[in-house]
Image (cartoon, rainbow, N blue to C red):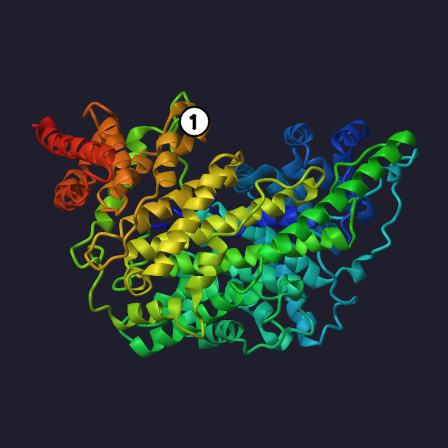
Amino acid sequence: MGRQHNNKKGRGGQRSNPILPTAAAAAASAASTAPDAPAAPAADQAKPAGALPVLGKLKSADPSERAWAATTLSHFVQDAALRKQLLSANLFGLLFPLLADTHANVVLEVLGTLHNLLIAGGDDMAADLVRSGLLPLMLACFGNVAAQVHRAIADGGHSAAAAPRPVRATPRSAPMSMEMEDGSVVKSDEDDDKVSPFALAEHAMGVLWSLGEGSNDVVKALSMADVVAFAMAMLDPAHAALVPLSLVVVSGQFLNMLTDNNPEVHPFFVSTPAYAECLMSYVTGGIPGYDVWDDNRLQVPMLAACILENLRLALIELSDVARTTEFYNAILGAVSRVLDLDIAAQVDGIVAAGAAVDAIEASQAAKAAAQGGESFDGIGIVENKDSQRIKLFSSQLETVQLGLEILTNIYSEDMQDGGEPWQDADADDDEDEDGEAGADDLDDEMFEDMGMVAGDESGNPTGASESPDHHVASLSAALFAPPTTIFPKLVRFATLHVPTRPAPGASAALDAVAHVRTVQTRAVACISNMALVGYLGEWSVQRAGEFVELWDRLFAFVVAASSSSTTKADLESLEGTMALLWSLTNMVTGKTSPRLAPRDDVVQWLLQAIQPTSGAPAPLRAKPNRLALMARLASTPTEDAAVLCEVLNALYDIYADAAFDYDAPVFVAGGFLAHLQTAYPAVRSRFRGIDKRRDRALRDRADEMLLNLRAFITYKAGERK
């Protein structure tokens, strides 16, 4: 796999391996466990109530009825059939004007409905909303809300009649009993003067963030000085007593989206140095209270670090070694603190918490069924210490992923010119009718890897400077030296033991466990980048024992995972780990490199894994780099002659015919013939050193393999002439 880079390929689609979920997805996650998030009615409960009659209430003269209608619709739009019905009945045309409603409670619930539309409909829904003219109305609404927030801050919060309360990712549920026989609705107990402007701001920014994630046009429209100034004001520690943490977080997420590959906003930060100073204060721990995992407050420094990395080339001249070094020392220090999270120690407890939540939900469902009541879809049904524990753990994993995103970007870009993003190595492979990835698509990334990691005799990857510049030296030191010492932490994440699936009766923990596997995959990708770019060359030579230990641990994970992986996250982790093994194996090319002596279990597993009848996942069998890995191992002299015989024999079978679809892209393009020619003298010396009197059978087999190797080299050299 090629170097992975986390910048978007271009807006208009989600990142192939998003580090944070889109705003919509994040809101969905929050909705499932928010303290005041009520149960949403299941589809079979909602449908009888009638979706279309509710639309009429949006035009009611009573603001309480308008707010109630928006609240009810926020649940209806989560059902695909009802959503389609509502959209056909002009939902947008009725909903959009209410963004300018003079009653704050109505605006709050309308924003919540829009948020749920984005949650349910994803990028397609976002595009439909933009095409239907939502953006100008949202900007006008945002302007009004921002003015209210600024007034509240200016007078110390007194203009906000109530203390800031957390905004609901899913608006409050209107009980179906509100539909009275006379058609009226119960008045809300939250009057307009009790709606916090900070709650409005959080909803509005969440909607704009969701829209911006999928469209360059939206990002361009949001690239205004006033918008940036408002988001930065929410991050200003001077306002910490008023601005709730949830609004601080969404402001950081919004700015991370807005500054990513968007030079139009860079001048705002260059002309206002206080912005960067504020962000750096979070990163360095200068703002108290954000260096702890409580309420996942460490997410804010990570978001600040992401924003600063997006702005790095605008804020710092590349030639300014001192400032660049200081910048990366601060960023990597913050990342290192996040990587101290002990995920392994929490996994079992999270699975147990999921089982406890499941048990309560099952009990509630059984009780409701016995009473003849309606069931609910599970959103917010259980809210206790176990569900809160799962929620906090998931949010902590998001923060770790942010840190890994930063590392992936830093250790993959060309430090000399800022570099173009490399092809996203996580992009889905095309598949043929049998589910096997197409050879041509698979081989493109193999070509890329082989070209980048072909080594010279000194063991340095091609293109890796023997005299790294100051930036590279600083980044290398951060991997292995205090106070950051990032690399051992990455290894710990990359080799996590994660249950393939939670135990039966722990489905509430399913997403959290899958999230752990995603973190593991990202850590593996970081190490792969470092190996491909050349940051690990010195380590592999000076700490050869650690190198071999890492290879063995990764291979052990692959062997174990290949027999039980079923989910997409499992397979992504498996594929990423195999790619890392490929990268590490390609580092053992020089005379001073660590020696990887393939064991018999390694060879036998590789041979078995590529067989269609092996039971191994299709992507594992299809990827030709598994065969390339075998050839690479075959070209590495080993002290175990019997193993080497097995490897060579397998090599002859696998690459016996140029007509095989993987022969040209793997054996030929990878230069394996040259590797075998180079290895031939060492293999011959090893085989001829076998004592015929002590092990006649092995010597005879070795002699046969040596003759075959010579013939194989001659055959392959002339095969394509």
- Helix, strand or loop for disc 1: helix
Q: Is residue 583 left or right of residue 433?
A: left
Question: Is 38 on the left or on the right of 572, as rendered?
Answer: right
Q: For the residue marked with disc 1, what is the amino acid?
A: Ser
Of the 4 image quadrants, the one containing the N terminus is top left
Q: Residue at x 87, y 48 (%)?
A: 187
Disc 1 target residue: 614
Place residue 634 in its image quadrant. top left
Image quarter of the C terminus: top left
- Residue 654 placed where, x, y %? 26, 28
For the residue pair 251 and 622, the one nearer the viewer reads as 622
The residue depicted at 40 percent of the width and 65 percent of the height is: 311
Give the x, y percent position of residue 168. Answer: 71, 53
Please state which of residues 687 and 209 is positioned toward the viewer in this rendering: 687
Left or right placement of residue 59 versus residue 220 in this view = right
Q: Compared with residue 644, is residue 541 higher up or lower down, i.e. above or below?
A: below
Residue 5 visible somewhere in the drawing: no
